[in-house]
Image (cartoon, helix red, strand yellow):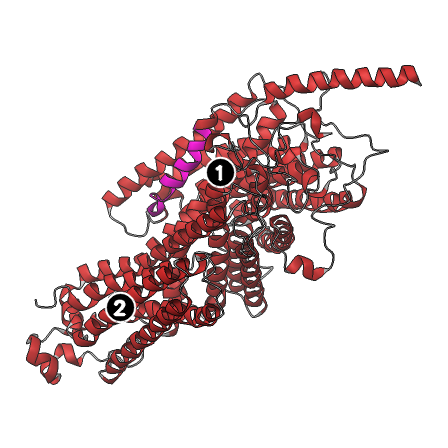
Amino acid sequence: MSDSTATVNGAPEAHGIPHGHEEHPAYLRHHFASVEQQADTTNFAMWLFLLTEIMFFGGLFTAYLIYRNWYYPAFVAASHQLNIFWGTANTGVLISSSFTMAMGVWCAETRRKSGLVLCLVLTFVLGLVFLGIKTIEYSEKVEKHHVPGFHYSVQAFTNPASDPETYKEYKDKPMPLDMARHTELYFFLYFAMTGMHALHMIIGIAILGFMIFRARAGAYTTGHVTFVENFGLYWHFVDIVWIFLFPLLYLISRHQ
Amino acid sequence: MSTNTIVSLPDQSTARIPKTNFITKENGLLSWLLTGDHKRIAILYLISITFFFFIGGALAGLIRLELLTPQSDLMATDTYNKVFTMHGVVMIFLFLVPSVPATLGNFLIPIMLGAKDLALPKINLLSWYLYVVGGILVLYTMISGGVDTGWTFTTPLSTHYVNTNVMSTGLAVFIAGFSSIFTGLNFIVTIHKMRCPGMTWFRMPLFVWAHYAASILMVLGTPVLAIAIVLVALERTVGIGVFDPTKGGDPLLFQHLFWFYSHPAVYIMILPGMGVISEVISTFSRKRVFGYTAVAFSSVAIAVFGFFVWAHHMFIMGISNYAMLVFSLLTMLVAVPSAIKIFNWTFTLYKGSITFETPMLYAFGFMGLFTIGGLTGVFLGTSGTDIHLTETYFIVAHFHFVMVGGMLMAFLAGIHFWWPKITGRMYPEKISQLAAVVTFIGFNFTFFPQFILGTLGMPRRYAAYPPEFQVLNVFSTAGATILGVGYLLPVLYLTWSLKYGEIAGNNPWQATGLEWQIQSPPLTENFTTIPIMDHEAYDYEWLENQTLTNQNLENQKAKEVASVG
C-alpha cells in the first residue's frame, strides 16, 4: 500500500550516530538514538524551562521598576529597613553553594562518588543556612510591623526617630503620610520576590535531598550526569535571581 | 485526475486494521493513564478537550437563549455574568489553547519529524494531568457558585468587588497554564533535537512550523499570566495593594501583565490551526504550498509581532496617546504575516487539482471567516474606531470569527483530515460534508448579526438590551442552534465510524507527509526504522509521477492475473 508513495527509505543504521553496535546503557530512553542526543535534548529543555522562569520573575521585576520610579523616596527609605549584614552574608552563602554545586557536577563527570555526595550535602546545608538567615530577616520585619496586608505600620517612615537604630545610621527625614504609605508596596515586592525565590530554594533543597540518596547509591557516577547537570543549572539560576534581588532591594540608592 | 475525489482506499473485502498498533499494544485503563506514548496522550487530550468544549458550548447556548428576548428573563443578571465568564474561561483555557497543539500536534509532530516520540514523554503526560486538574477546578468553581469577573479577571473588580470563586478559577488557570507551558516546551525541544536525518528546517511540514511559533508564545507568555494570577490571589487574600490604587498600586499594571500573555494567547490558539490549513490546502490541491518559506516565516513573524501589540486591549483604559499610537501601528503589522498566509493559500489553490473532501470544506470556511475576522481586527486595532467599537458586540463578533470561524473550523478540518490516520477508519464523507456546510451556515447566522449589533452600539456582557435589537439577536440565537447541530453531528458520526467506518489504509489522501507513509493507526514506536527525509515537503509533482507509474504496474499485474485466471 505505502509503496506507491514510498518516500521513506528504511535504513536501519542511518542515524549518522553509532547505534546498535553496542549494548544500550540502561538510562538511554527508547525514543532517543544516542546518549548524546538524550543529553543534548534534556539540557536544552532545562534551558527553556529556565527561560519560562525568567518570564515568571519578570512580572515582579516589572512591578518593582514601575513602583520604584513612582515612589522613589518611599523605596529608598524602606530599603534602609533591610538588614544589610544578613543580606550580604546570605549572598556569600548562596555563591558558595553555587560553587559546591558546580564542584558536584564536576565530581559526577569525573565519577567521584564520595566527592559528589560531599558536594551535594554541602550545597544542601548551605541552602538550609540561606533559608535560616532569611527566616531571621523575615521575623525582624514581623517585629517591626513591616509585613504588608496584615498589620502594616508606617511609623518608622512618618517618624523615623521612633526607630533609633535605623535613624542613627541614615538620618531619614520624616515622610508625609501619603508617600510613607507607599513603603507598603516596597515591602510587598520585597516579600513577593524573596518569597518566590525562597520557594524555589525549598524546591531545590527537596530535590537535593533526593539526589543525595541517589548519589550514595551511585546513580550519577556511571557517566550519565544529565540529571546532576540540569539540577546544577536550576540551582545556579536561583542564585542568579538572588544576585539581581540583592542589589535591587538592599543596595541601590541606599545612601541617598 | 478525472474523478472528483482523491480518496484511495484499500479493497474493503480484504483490508484489515493492522493487528499491532498503538491502540492495541496494551490494554486496560492503567496502560492509558500511565502511558508515555504521545499518540495515546493525544487521545486522552482529545477526549477531555471535547468534554470541555461541550460544557463551554452549553454555556454559550444559555447565553444565546437569554439574549433571545430583550429582558433578562431566563436567568438573573448575576447568573448571566457567571455564565458568560465560565463560557470564556472554559473555552479559552480548556479548549482553544490546547485544542490543536495538545491533540493533533501531540499526535503528529513526532511522526512528521520522523521521531519515535516527543522529547519528554513524562512531561507530556504530566501536562495532561495538569490540564485535568485545571479542568476539575473549573468544574468545582461552576458547581460551587461560579465566578463573574469575565474571563479577563479585571482588577479591581476581581480583587475587591466580587465575592465569587475568583481563587479557584485563578488556580485552575494557573495550573492549566503550566500544562500549556510544558506542551510548548516539549514541542520546541522535539523540533530542535528530534528531527530524523535529512529533515532540515525547511523540509519540515508547515504544521510543524506553526506549532513551533505557537510554542514560543506558550513558553514566553504563559509564565507572565501565572505571575499576574498569583498577584491577584495575593491581593485578594492579603490585600497587598499592588493593583490597588488606594494603596498606590495600579490596576493598569494588571492589564499589562494579563494582556502580555492573553494577546499572544490568541496566536497560541490560531497558529496551530493555520498549520492544519496549510496541510489540508496543499493535499487537496495536489500542490506544494505556494511560497513555503514565506508561510513558514510568517508563523514566526506572527509570534514575534504578537508580543508587541498587547496594549491594543487597553485603548479605553487610560494609557497615553503615544502608547496608543505605537500599539495601533504595531497591531497593523500583525496583519501582514496573517495576510501572507491567506494569499499564499489562495495561490496554492490556483491551478491546483482541487477536490472538496470534508477537511477542504472546513479549510475554505476557515479562509473566508478568518479573513473577515482578521480585517475587523484592523478596525479594533485602530485606536479611533476601537474606542467606539470596543466593549460592544462588534468585538464579540470579531473574536468569534477568528476563534470559532477560524480555529474551530481548523480543528475540525484537522480532526477529519487525520481521523483515518488516528483510528485507521474513514469518517462517512457525505454526512460530514453536510456537517461542514451546516456549521458554516450556522456560524454566519450566529455571528454576522453581532457585527451589526456592535456598530449599532449594543454593549457586550449584559443580560438585557433595548427592544430594537431583538430581531438581530433572534437571528443570532437561531444561528447558534444550527451551529450546535453542526457540532453535534461530527461527534455522532465520528463515534460511529470507530466501528463501522471504511478501512482507511495507510494513505487515503495520497498525501506526501511522513505520517502518511506509516500504517494507520501507527505503531507505538511510529517507525520500524528511523526514516531518512530525502525530499522537500509537499512534493506532489514527484508523487503524481510515482503514482502513475505504480498504477500502470498494478494494471499490468491485474491483467496478468486475469489472463492466468
Task: Find out whether residue B295 is within the magenta segment.
Answer: yes
Q: Is residue B272 left or right of residue A184?
A: right
Task: Find out whether residue B449 is within the magenta segment.
Answer: no
Which mark identifies residue A96?
2
Tell me the SS state at disc 1. helix
| B417 in relation to B496, above or below | above
Q: Position of residue B497 (x, y in %)?
A: 76, 42
Q: Which residue is mark 1?
A: B210
Res. B398 visible in picture: no
Closer to the camera in the image, B279 or B327: B279
Q: Is residue B462 left or right of residue A50?
A: right
Give the magenta part as a residue range: B294-312
Tell me where residue A180 sits by quadrant.
bottom left
Closer to the camera in the image, B392 or B417: B417
> Which residue does the image show at 37% across and 62% down from the upper left?
A107
Q: Is residue B255 left or right of residue B266?
A: left
| Main secondary-structure element of the magenta-colored stretch | helix
Q: Chain under label 1?
A: B
The amino acid type of the residue labelled 1 equals Ala
| A187 in relation to B23, above or below | below
The alpha-carbon separation of the residues under discs 1 and 2 comes to 44 Å
**Mark count:** 2
- Quarter of the figure with the C terminus of chain A: bottom left
> Which residue does the image show at 86% across and 33% down from the upper left?
B13
Disc 2 crowd, CA 10 A, few/some/many (<14, 14-19, 20+): some
Q: Position of residue B230 (x, y in %)?
A: 39, 65
The amino acid type of the residue labelled 2 equals Ser
Tell me the SS state at disc 2. helix
Which mark identifies residue B275?
none
